[in-house]
């Protein structure tokens, strides 16, 4: 792969770490990260009641190298639920935004994240740099993300685009497909930023209606990005498709791929990333799959130290074809807490269902529910199609599901029942389509 423009995140990172010019070496970045890790640990031990207890007997002086970070304890989502305010290193009056995250069906308290104005400014800065890879002055970007509240992801992206001379067109998550397509046509949007499943729904609806739209680039964010969705968007719109990796805990930052589409260039000026064994917590080298662990490097309000994200991925070996010095993360393949076990036949994930079912032509969306309250597990799929469903659609959906090895093996063993309900999409999308999960009944 030749002639690929180097990601513009390099110039951003060089500015952040104080490197001379746009170029910097891996050694320079490692030295910067080590210094920031020491500062973060010292700051947290001094100002956070939670970290004062967690890091008792440990100090920033224990870090002689980046590898020494593996000797420090992890933090996790349960810590945020139980001790949210005790993470704070500043007065609550210095907090400009509080985000409450659902507790994923548990009965315990929700996670609350606290961000200062400086934290949110850092997110805007990252968005501004990342978006230059796919939009330039003169483009119009349709933002299909929540943006009603100040400081939300859509609002921060709008500010970042305006600073770049790109016109943002806030729309919000897609609830009405025809209305979103009408906005695209009216504004002549050249770029979309949205949730993978929702953007695919727009593309397939537009294709079925014979709509021609001037889309040149798409950025998919906030959820797992199935490879089949990328292929379909390229086929239908002939556009380039980029991916963003991020999470609310990180202030929505994380990483973005470049024109080489060879992994997410990580937001290493503000975060340190590790991959660990999900069971033992031991570090795993580049190329090996494990759980993503992140430490914030510049956050002063609510720093996170060795935060276990639950995402399963790997750091990629070797340089990106674009020549960047930033490390790259492979696409996330699932979550540590998202495995659906099928006994001796193995397990499957929502990501497996995505790749299988979105390959069915005309599928607009689906929901999945697993019932383990009987001898044979039941997997129920409710599918929404662009055309009126027939018996051939049910056969196609079952055939697609059986491309997942664990599902096929469990059906052959008689330990899994499939039920399929298909209907024609009327143009609406459920709010759950923005952040999907498999409903488990047990």
Image (spheres, rainbow, N blue to C red):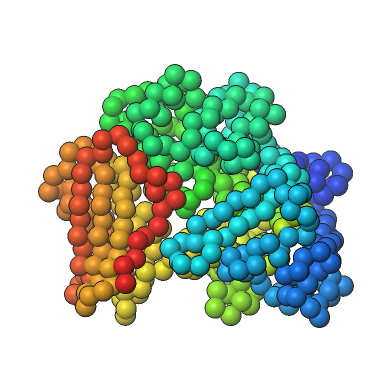
Where in the figure is residue 119, as x and y percent of width and height? Answer: 72, 48
Where in the figure is residue 410, as x and y percent of width and height? Answer: 25, 72
Residue at image point 67% right, 24% down: 165
Where in the figure is residue 142, as x and y percent of width and height? Answer: 51, 30
Question: 268 or 178, which is in the foreground?
Answer: 178
Residue at image point 39% right, 23% down: 182
Question: 64 or 258, which is in the foreground?
Answer: 64
Relative vertical location of residue 155 with respect to residue 46 in this rendering, above or below:
above
Left or right of 395, for residue 350: right
Q: Can residue 366 be seen in the rendering of this structure?
A: yes
Count of numbered marks = 0
| Quadrant of the image containing the N terminus | top right
- Residue 73 occupies which quadrant of the picture? bottom right
Which residue of the protein is positioned furthest toward the top in this rendering? Answer: 186
Left or right of 313, for residue 393: left
Q: Can residue 192 be seen in the rendering of this structure?
A: no
Relative vertical location of residue 256 with respect to residue 416 in this rendering, above or below:
above
Residue at image point 57% right, 69% down: 78
Question: 439 or 292, which is in the foreground?
Answer: 439
Residue at image point 45% right, 38% down: 173
- Residue 230 occupies which quadrant of the picture? top left
| Quadrant of the image containing the C terminus | bottom left
Which residue of the protein is positioned furthest toward the front in this rendering? Answer: 93
Relative vertical location of residue 257 with respect to residue 77 in this rendering, above or below:
above
Left or right of 223, for residue 211: left
Where in the figure is residue 176, as x and y percent of width and height? Answer: 36, 33
Which residue of the protein is positioned furthest toward the left in this rendering? Answer: 391
């Amino acid at each position: 792969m030749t002639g690929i423009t180097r990601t513009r995140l390099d110039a951003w990172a060089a500015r952040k770490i104080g490197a001379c010019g746009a170029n910097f070496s891996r050694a320079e970045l490692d030295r910067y990260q080590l210094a920031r890790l020491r500062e973060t640990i010292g700051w947290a031990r001094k100002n956070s009641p939670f970290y004062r207890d967690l890091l008792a007997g440990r100090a920033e002086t224990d870090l002689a190298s980046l590898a020494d970070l593996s000797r420090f304890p992890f933090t996790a989502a349960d810590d945020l639920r139980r001790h949210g305010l005790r993470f704070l290193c500043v007065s609550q009056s210095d907090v400009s935004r509080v985000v409450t995250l659902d507790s994923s069906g548990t009965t315990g308290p929700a996670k609350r994240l606290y961000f200062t104005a400086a934290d949110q400014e850092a997110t805007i800065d990252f968005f501004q740099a990342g978006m230059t890879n796919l939009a330039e002055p003169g483009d119009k970007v349709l933002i299909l993300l929540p943006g009603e509240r100040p400081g939300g992801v859509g609002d921060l992206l709008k500010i970042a685009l305006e600073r770049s001379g790109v016109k943002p067109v806030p729309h919000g998550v897609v609830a009405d497909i025809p209305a979103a397509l009408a906005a695209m046509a009216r504004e002549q949007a050249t770029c979309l930023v949205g949730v993978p499943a929702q953007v695919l729904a727009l593309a397939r609806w537009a294709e079925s209606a014979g709509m021609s739209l001037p889309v040149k680039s798409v950025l998919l964010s906030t959820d797992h990005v199935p490879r089949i969705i990328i292929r379909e968007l390229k086929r239908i719109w002939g556009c380039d498709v980029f991916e963003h990796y991020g999470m609310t805990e990180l202030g929505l930052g994380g990483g973005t791929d470049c024109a080489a589409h060879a992994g997410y260039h990580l937001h290493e000026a503000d975060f340190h990333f590790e991959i660990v064994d999900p069971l033992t917590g031991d570090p795993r080298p580049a190329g090996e799959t494990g759980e993503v662990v992140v430490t914030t490097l510049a956050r002063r309000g609510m720093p996170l130290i060795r935060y276990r994200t639950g995402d399963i991925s790997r750091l990629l070996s070797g340089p990106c074809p674009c020549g960047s010095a930033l490390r790259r993360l492979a696409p996330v393949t699932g979550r540590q807490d998202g495995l659906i076990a099928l006994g001796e036949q193995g397990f499957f994930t929502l990501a497996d269902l995505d790749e299988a079912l979105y390959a069915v032509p005309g599928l607009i969306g689906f929901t999945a529910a697993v019932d383990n309250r009987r001898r044979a597990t039941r997997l129920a799929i409710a599918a929404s199609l662009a055309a009126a469903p027939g018996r051939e659609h049910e056969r196609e959906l079952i055939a697609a599901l059986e491309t997942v090895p664990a599902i096929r093996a469990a059906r052959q063993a008689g330990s899994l029942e499939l039920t399929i309900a298909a209907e024609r999409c009327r143009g609406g999308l459920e709010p759950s389509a923005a952040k999907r999960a498999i409903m488990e009944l047990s």
